[in-house]
Image: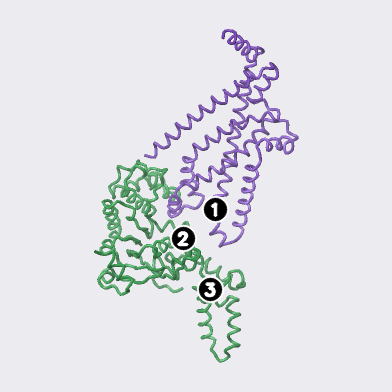
Chain colours: A purple, B green
Amino acid sequence: MKEWFADLTQQFELNFITGDRWTWLLEGFKMTLVITFFATLLGIAIGVVIATVRSSYDKNKESMKKKGGFGYRILSFFNGLCGLYLTVIRGTPVVVQLLIMYFIIFASSTNSTMVAVISFGINSGAYVAEIFRGGIMSVDKGQFEAGRSLGFNYIQTMRYIVIPQMFKIVLPMLCNEFIVLIKETSIAGYVGIRDLTKAGDLIRGRTFSAFMPLIAVALIYLAVVIIFTKLVKRLERRLRNSDH
Amino acid sequence: MTTEKKALVKVDGLYKYFGSNRVLRGISAEIDKGEVVVVIGPSGSGKSTFLRCLNLLEEPTYGEVWLEDKLVTPVDPYLHADVIELSKTYQKLFAQHKSAHPGASDESIKEELIKKIKVEDLLHEKHEGKAYKSLMKKIYDENYININLARQKIGMVFQQFNLFENLTVIDNITLAPMKLLKMSKEDATKKANELLERIGLLDKADAYPVQLSGGQKQRIAIVRALAMDPDVLLFDEPTSALDPEMVGEVLDVMKELAKSGMTMVVVTHEMGFAKEVASRVIFIDEGVIMEENTPEEFFSNPQNPRLRDFLSKVLI
């Protein structure tokens, strides 16, 4: 027992203390958070646009089709484009998307962090778009009609009435998307980014002991996810309370 | 157009199809300023659809809705004989008829053809030629009103209240006046408070809709519509979703409104309200107006057998 414990301590020193290797993990963790944060922002921006186009199309296609004209063609073109985007992004693995971004689309760029942010942002946008669309659809139809009946146009009704209510509905799901994204960024090492996972792997390569660094990395992810899940739970409870 | 006195709301030849389901099948009606028109009918008769067509929450399949001298819906070519005459379809048929019946007068052929085109729905927007199109456009341009502007003058109260859940009572009432009429926050709030005072709910100004009872919600929904100073108020079964003990408080507000001279169109099952307040009662069934009369005549001396049947079932 004593022997085992001494071995553990020695392993810990070798992997984290020697050469200040714990700072690798810290730097990697920072990188993971940076990529996740900006990718989430980009994902939300893309998601809002896509969800707006798609739900506008769903809501107005009947009346616009009847009138025909230019507006309908433009809207249905963009709706088709959004549909294509969703299909492609959700139908291919993130790793492949990341590699395509890095080696083909942004082949001339040296800023791999930016490429990762864009990749994960575009990927996340597809899922966020569907979250928002679900949110818009779950706002009671009567709210929309009441807005229109007062004389608000489509955009005003969305802005003042539907979207504020939608945000309340989708906030917990958005946080979940953030949690998913944190874990997904662990593949950033594929394009040479030193994120948390890559940092653990580098330590393993240097010390030739896998147990300590990889378990440490796993525990850090786990801790972050548990903390965020708790926060989301609390948020959900708060939102529910304001309903009564 | 002559200078005859215009109805506040005029509905002409209104049809509404949902797919193959023909909900409205030719409704025409006029509502004058200050009138309280109560619309009754069995469920599924089309009375709510009729009401929702007035502010275009449902777009009519055919027919026109006018708000005073302004056209709310698109132009319906079937309502304009001069438009039909310019269509290629008419001209083709006219030539055919002329050669088939050389003896017939132009006038009688015209009358017959216009009727035929209307009944058989023969016009095809895209293939009727330039003259047809330009007259349609001219009528539209001369008369149309932007639907959002029209809706500012046509208030609506819903069965399910539809107060904005994300806003407090006071914000529910002031949102539209501030954003659409560009009223200052002070003016809008002052007006909202006066209206709330009138219905005795001033103390609820800062509450959220979820904290209110159904009756309170509906009274506030009425006030929200009133805050826009509408020319006419539409009520879509305003008491149907309420607990029985709350029906009275909402009806009282509506009665007071009617007395103050507000023009109202009310779809309801409250026969007592119709008897007491209505200036006219309309009975709709199977998508057409079956009977229309003053409440006294309507209830004491119904002509239409379907109405008699309906009244015998709802009145105890």
Badge count: 3
Where does the image place residue B260, in percent across and percent down from the top left?
Answer: 29, 59
Q: Is disc 1 in contact with disc 2, using a CB cutoff of under 8 Å?
A: no
Numbered badge on residue B121: 3
The percent coordinates of residue A123 (x first, y second) are 62, 39
Q: Quadrant of residue B31?
A: bottom left
Nearer-N-terminus badge (2/3): 2
In which quadrant is the C terminus of chain B drawn?
A: bottom left
- Label 2 marks a residue whose chain is B
- Closer to us: B54 or B121: B121
Q: Which mark is residue B136?
A: none
Q: Are marks 2 and 3 in contact (CB under 8 Å)?
A: no
- Neighbor class of circle 1 (other Cα within 10 Å; few <14, some 14-19, many 20+) is few
User: Which residue is drawn at the image coordinates 75% and 34% (left, top)?
Assistant: A108
- Residue B58 — which label? 2
Name the foreground residue: A85 vs A9. A9
Amino acid type for the residue under numbered disc 3: Asp
Of all chains, the one bearing label 3 is B
Q: Amino acid at mark 1?
A: Asp
- Judged from this view, the residue extending furthest toward the right is A108
Instruction: Tell me the residue that label 1 is attached to.
Output: A58
Q: Quadrant of residue A70?
A: bottom right
| Same chain assignment for discs 1 and 2 | no
Type of amino acid at the residue the image marks with label 2: Glu
Q: Is residue A192 above or below residue A204?
A: below
Q: Chain of mark 1?
A: A
Q: Is residue B316 left or right of residue A114?
A: left
